Amino acid sequence: MGLCALAFVPLSTLAMDFRILGPLEVLEGERQLAIGSRKQRALLAILLLHAGSVVSRDKLVDALWAGDPPATASAALRVHVSELRKILESADADRRVLLTVDPGYRLELRPGELDLARFEKLLAEATGPADRPDSAAVATSLRAALAMWRGQALADFAYEAFAAQAIGRLEELRLVAHERCIDAELELGRERELVPELDELVAQHRLRERLRGQLMLALYRCGRQADALASYQDGRRVMADELGIEPGQPLQTLEQQILNHDPVLNLHAPPSVDALSMPGTSQPSPQEESKGASDGQVTDAPVETPDRSVLLFGQREESLDALVALGAALAKQPPRELILVRAVNPDEDLIDATMALAKRRSEINARGHAARTAAFNSDSPGADVVRLASEQDADLLLMHADEALLRSGTIENDLEFVLQSASCDVGLVAAGGELQEGRPVMVPMGGAEHEWAAVEVGAWAAKALDVPLMLLGSSGESGDSKDASRLLAHASLATQKGLGVDASPMLVEPGDRGVIEAAERGSLLVVGLSDRWQQDGLGATRQAVARDANVPVLIVRRGLRPGGLAPRHSQTRFTWALSGRAG
């Protein structure tokens, strides 16, 4: 299939066209369907975001009534489903679009009927694993994908709680597609046409280093060296003022290359705008040179900086050891930069905290990892770290699960904001011990959606640590012949097909004690955070495991955008494998 085969199916040939990349619309041929009430439109939007998957009645009730449903909510939901079904199936009596499947409902669409599916297909195919893709085909494909957008995703639900995370994820997808399209067009020598577009994008996303690097490169190739350097200085000031950090090493390297008129920037030898750093050209920042000269120490040896990162965020110095140990392990393969930041307490000295982090950076660099560090004062650290994770393009945000959380199981304040708002994967680290080399990564698996997310993260952790992956399932109650072995077999097949990772099953005693005892044989326990965390907190079993296990426990909330810990080219295949639609 060519790059654009699915996306360029003429819309007139589709029986129905469901659109969420803008205000919600449903077209039947050329006719736009009138979806009745606000609740029916919201119901359809939720089902479209989970197209092909069963959405439980409880989840729909929580979403439609913002966690505060009336006593009549279940009956009202049945009425809304019935009315929506009549609208969607009115033209074709033989077709079933909205199915009742315990414990809820599933929207069954045909290939290409959802604009998001067409967009994601183009994005995945245009950024496949090929070493040298056809830049013209990639650019054409991604421009077609971007043309599908009619404004902000689900614009008519911008202020609805159920849509907040989805809108964040979809807008991040759109930005990723834009960046990759610009990469391809820079390789085609279209820098003059790109400068106005990049000016606008950088103004909207001032801390997004990749976009700024693309603008600097385009300006330089247009003969505007001074403007390219001015853009770097503007970005440096913004990052210093708003985040208290310097630009990343790739952007610093690009500035040096522009100053030196490095031939590698020319079109016939284009640098990778993903990374922007070239072998042998990494240089320390002026601040690092000044630090080394002033305290008599040798500056950190240059380490090639990956284009993706893991952000480690702590509010206490003593919480950082476990974060660094796990973050460095997960960032091994494929390599990711470690960004270690602290929100400093009012009674601490900011300079002392910054120097302590700089020492940790040197230790991390000495182990072969690229790292940056920063400390800052903050009245709202949750909001600051969410913004930092987005602007630094983090795949994973690791935070410490403190004693108060493990005692109460209640998620509130800054942690609640982070889990609600962060676009990347979020992991809460409960340090029950040190990572033990050679021992497997353990993942409890009961079949819930959030547990599939934990399997995905656990598979990648096992790959990065070069250890086996083991899935834990209930052995069933005493005298009960039903156990989780079939479910574990299904999960194992999915990880093999989607991620190329073998997973061994282990049946354990039901409840937290069985998981805790099994974890004694592992190096890391990865647990998925329930989608109901706002109502249930950690949950009793998860709380007990995180509190009492003698190995590090990583509690995972899946991110709002693709990327995450799993290799990007495996994401879609793994999702299809889980749902039985792999192809």
Image (cartoon, helix red, strand yellow):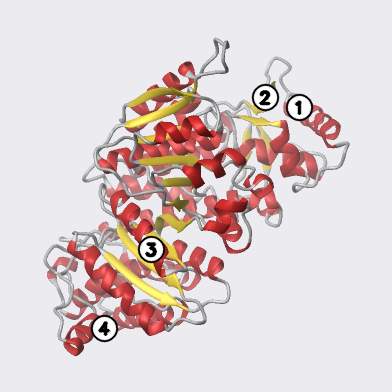
Circle nearer the N terminus (4, 2): 2
Residue under pointer 3: 320
Query: Which residue appears at 16% of the width and 77% of the height?
Result: 261
Q: Amino acid at mark 4?
A: Gln
Q: Amino acid at mark 2?
A: Val
Distance between mark 3 and mark 2 Cα atoms: 50 Å
| Front residue of this view, candidates 90 and 280 | 280
Give left or right: position of 120 versus 110: left
Circle nearer the N terminus (3, 2): 2
Circle nearer the N terminus (1, 2): 1
Circle nearer the N terminus (1, 3): 1
Residue under pointer 2: 97
Residue under pointer 1: 85
Residue 247 locus on image (x, y percent): 33, 74
Picture quadrant where residue 550 is located: top left
Q: Is residue 572 visible?
A: no
Distance between mark 4 and mark 3 Cα atoms: 24 Å
Distance between mark 4 and mark 2 Cα atoms: 60 Å
Q: Residue furthest right?
A: 72
Q: Is residue 210 visible?
A: yes
Q: Looking at the image, do the residues carrying marks 1 and 4 touch, with CB atoms under 8 Å apart?
A: no
Q: Is the residue 396 above or below the residue 252 in the image? A: above
**Other residues around mark 4 within 10 Å, as few (<14) / some (14–19) / many (≥20):** few
